[in-house]
Image (cartoon, rainbow, N blue to C red):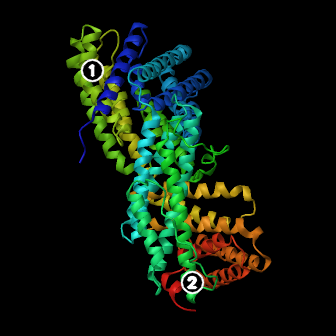
Amino acid sequence: MASWPNARQWLFSLKAFAAAMLALYIALALGLARPYWAMATVYFVSHPLTGATRSKAAYRVAGTVLGATAAVATVPQLVNMPIVLMGAIALWISVLVYLSLLQRTPRSYVCLLAAYTLPIVALPAVSQPAQIFDIAVARIEEIVIGIVCAGLVGSVVFPAKVAPALRARADTWLADAAAWASDILLGSARADHSRHRLAADILQLDQLISQLAYDTEGSHTLRQARGLRRRMTMLMPLLSSLDSVLQALRCHAGGVPPELRQALAATAAWLAGDAAGPAAAAPEGLGIASVPGTSGWHDHLAATAADQLQRLGDLYGECRALQQGLGDHRAGTPLPRGEAGTEAAGHHHDHGMLLFGAVSSGLAVFCAGLLWIFSGWEDGAGAVVVASIACCFFAAVDEPRRMAGAFVRWSAICLLISCGYLFLVVPHAHTFEALAALLALPYLGIGLLIARPGFQLIAMLLSVNTAAFANVQAVFDADFLALFNACLASAAAMVYAPLWSVAARPFGARAAARRLVRASWHDLARAATLRASDGDARLGARMLDRLGQLVPRLGAAGDPLSADGFHALQVGYCALALRKALPDLPPPARKPVRRVLAAVARHFRAQLRAGQRVAVAADLASAVGEAMAAVAASGRAGQRGTLGALVVLQVTLLPLPAMISPR
C-alpha cells in the first residue's frame, strides 16, 4: 500500500514548483515562442538530491545544444527530400539512443537529449526552413532557462546532499546483507529472498555514487564511496559460497563441528548487534589435508567455512566503517591509492539487445514520419515529435507491455487536465501570480510523483504534456480547431509509441535474462582459461554487474533460473582464484588444477552449445578430487585458499549426494 508523501517529498515538490514558475516568468518576460518548455524542463532535470540535479542539468544542456546544432545542419540540406530527412532523423535517433544506453552515469543524458532534440527542433521548421536557426536558438534558450532555474533553486533552497542519502541507502543494504548472512549462519531457509534483493539494490547505489561526483563533497568522500561499493560487491560472492559450503557441511554425516557452530552463532549475534566491536574469531586448526570421500572431505568443508567466516567478519567490519564515515572527513577510513574507478571497467553490456532497442526506436520514428508525409496532415509533425520522445524512453524498457497501459491512461488524464485548464482556468488568470496559483494544484502533484520511486517516467510525461496542451503563452489564444489538431496529434503519438514498442519487442525480460545467463556461461569458460592476469578484476566485476542486471529481470519474467547468477558468481571467482594461484603451486599440484580448469571450461562451453543447463561431466568431479589431494599433499602453508576454491567449486557444480557419498 502506497504511503502518504513525507516532509522531504513535499519540500522537493515546492522547490520544483518554485523553479518552474521562475523559469516560466523569465521565458514569458523574454517573449519566447514556447515558454512552457522552460517550465516543463524544470521537472525533467529536478531530482530530490542536489548533486543529481546538477549532473542532469549539465549534461542536458550539452545534449540540447548538440541536437539543435544537428537540426540546423540537417534541415536546410534535406528539407526538399522529406523521406531522406526522416531517414536521417531515424538514423540519428538510433545511434544516439544506443550510445545513451551504453552509459549508466549522468553522461547518458547528453546522448538521450541530443536524440530527441533533433526532431523537436527540425520537424516544426520543415514548413519554414529559413527560420531553423531562430527556432533552434529559441529551443535552447527555453530549455537552458529551465535547467538553470532548477539548478539554482535546488542548490540555494535547502540543498539535499548525496552523501547522507548514500549513507542511509548503504546502511539499509548492509542491514539486508547482515540478515542474509544470519540466515546462512543459522541455517534459515529465507536466504534466497535476501540475496535477490541485494543484487538488485546494488545498481541503485551505483547511481548515487555517480551523482556524488557532482555534489559539494570532496574527492575523499568519493573515494570512500567507491571503496565501500567495491567491498560490498565482494560480500555477495563470499556469502553465496559460504551458504553452499555450510549446506554441504550440514548434510554431511559429521555435521558442523562444535567449535565452528559456536563461531557461527557468535558471528550471527555480532551481525545482529550492528557489528559493534570486533568480529568473533573463527576457530583455527579445522583443516586436515586428505581426499574428499574420506573423513578429510568433512575437514575440508569445515576449514573452508572457517576461513570464509573470518573473511566475512573482516569484510563486513570494513564496510560498516566506511559506511558510517561517508561524508565525515575525520571519521573516514583512508583508502589505498588506485581504488577508484575499478567498477566501471567491469560493466556488462548486451550490445545485441541495446542495439535492437535503439534501432527499433529509430524505425518507429521513421514510420511515423512516413505516415505524416503521405497523409498530408499539417499538424502531423507534432505527432512525430511526441512519438520520438516517447520511443526514446521506451528503448530502455524491458517489458513495454507492462508500461503501455499506464502510459496511455496517464496521457488521457494529461489531455483532460490540460483542456480544462486551457478553457476554464487560464482565461481567468489576468496576472502571473494568478496563473502560478492556478498551476500549483497539478504541478505540486507532479513534483510529489517525481520524488516517489517508480513514478519518474509518469511524472515527466505529465509535466510535458500538461504544459504543452495548456499552451501557456504571453497572450491567451484558445483556438479550438488548432487545439483539437494538436491534441489529436499528441494522442495519436501516445498510442502509437507504446503499441510499436509492444509489437517490436514481444519477448520482454525473459529473453534479456536468458541472454545474460548465456553471457555468464561464456565468461565462466573464459575465466577457466584466462591467461592475462590484468583481466581478472574486470572479469569478476563484470560477472557481478551482470548478476545485478539479471535478478530484477528474472523477477519480472518469473524465470526459474534465479540461482544461475549466484552459482555463476561462485564458479567464476573460484576459477579466477585457481588461475591466479597456479604460478605458486608446486609442479605436482599444478597439472591437476589445470585439469580442473579445463573441465570447467568444457562444461560451460557444452551449456553454450546446448543453450540450456547440462549435467556436470563425471571427469570434473574426479578432477577436483585429484586436485585437492595434490594440493593438500604439497604440505605448503598458504594453500588453504586454493583448497577452499576447489571445495566451493565442488559444492557449487556437483549435486549434493555426489559430494557426501563415499568414493
* Residue 380 seen from this side: no
* 195 left or right of 538 in image: left
- Furthest toward the bottom, the residue is 663
Q: Amino acid at mark 1?
A: Leu
Q: Amino acid at mark 2?
A: Trp
Residue 21 placed where, x, y %?
A: 35, 17
Disc 2 to disc 1, C-alpha distance: 72 Å
* 66 left or right of 550 in image: right
Residue picked out by circle 1: 439
Residue 347 placed where, x, y %?
A: 59, 50
Viewer-proximal residue, 528 or 184? 184
* 477 left or right of 239 in image: left
Q: Is the residue marked by circle 1 packed among few (<14), some (14-19), or many (20+) residues within 10 Å?
A: some
At 31% from the left and 27% from the top, the residue drawn is 11
Q: Are marks 2 and 1 in contact (CB under 8 Å)?
A: no
Nearest to viewer (mark 2 / mark 1): 2
In the image, residue 626 above or below residue 190: below
Q: Quadrant of residue 454?
A: top left
Q: Where does the C terminus fall, quadrant-wise?
A: bottom right
At 41% from the left and 11% from the top, the residue drawn is 26
Viewer-proximal residue, 15 or 427? 15
* Residue 8 seen from this side: yes
**N-terminal label among 2 and 1:** 2
Residue 299 placed where, x, y %?
A: 56, 81
Residue 617 placed where, x, y %?
A: 60, 82
Q: Which mark is residue 297?
A: 2
Q: Is the residue marked by circle 2 packed among few (<14), some (14-19), or many (20+) residues within 10 Å?
A: many
Query: Regarding mark 2 in the picture, which secondary structure is present there?
Result: helix
Circle count? 2
Viewer-proximal residue, 33 or 17? 17
